[in-house]
Image (tube, rainbow, N blue to C red):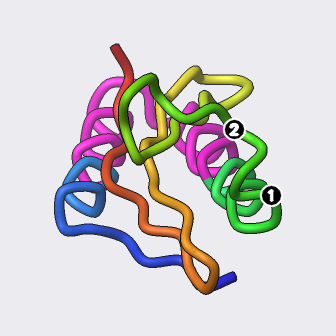
Amino acid sequence: MRLEVWPQADSDFEQIIAHYNALAPAELPGVLADIDRSLTWICEFPRAYPRLPGREYRRHVTSRYRFRIVYRAFSDRVEVMAIFRP
């Protein structure tokens, strides 16, 4: 499954990196691995995660750092729309 990242999600990812790099650089490799692992799972099982009520997109929560990844699943690709932590 092809992964496409929206500009907003790319910006979110860059902000996450900058935040951890500035405040907790030792945690950054774990954060990146957590997000990467989740993106791999989303690409392998795109419809395994719940669709938000009344929406066409789905949300996955990373296992360790609890980031929310909002995405849309299509037959040929996954579009990541946002990555954030509440």
The amino acid at mark 2 is Tyr
Give the class, few, some or many, for how many residues have Cα within 10 Å of label 2's Cα (few <14, many ≥20). some
The answer to whether 26 appears left or right of 64 in the picture is left
Circles 2, 1 touching at the beta carbon (< 8 Å): yes
Between 40 and 44, the residue placed more toward the observer is 44
Q: Is residue 31 magenta?
A: yes
Characterize the magenta stretch by its predominant secondary structure: helix
- Residue drawn at the location 70% of the way across and 67% of the way down: 43
The amino acid at mark 1 is Phe
Q: Which image quarter holds the N terminus? A: bottom right
Give the class, few, some or many, for how many residues have Cα within 10 Å of label 1's Cα (few <14, many ≥20). few
- Residue drawn at the location 29% of the way across and 56% of the way down: 9
- Dot 2 lies on which element? loop
Q: Which residues are magenta?
A: 14-35
The residue that label 2 is drawn on is 49
The residue that label 1 is drawn on is 45
Q: Is residue 69 magenta?
A: no
- Residue 46 picture quarter: bottom right
- Residue drawn at the location 55% of the way across and 72% of the way down: 74
- Residue 83 picture quarter: top left
Q: Is residue 82 above or below residue 25?
A: below
Q: Which image quarter holds the C terminus? A: top left
- Residue 44 picture quarter: bottom right
The answer to whether 64 appears left or right of 24 in the picture is right
Outermost residue toward the top?
86
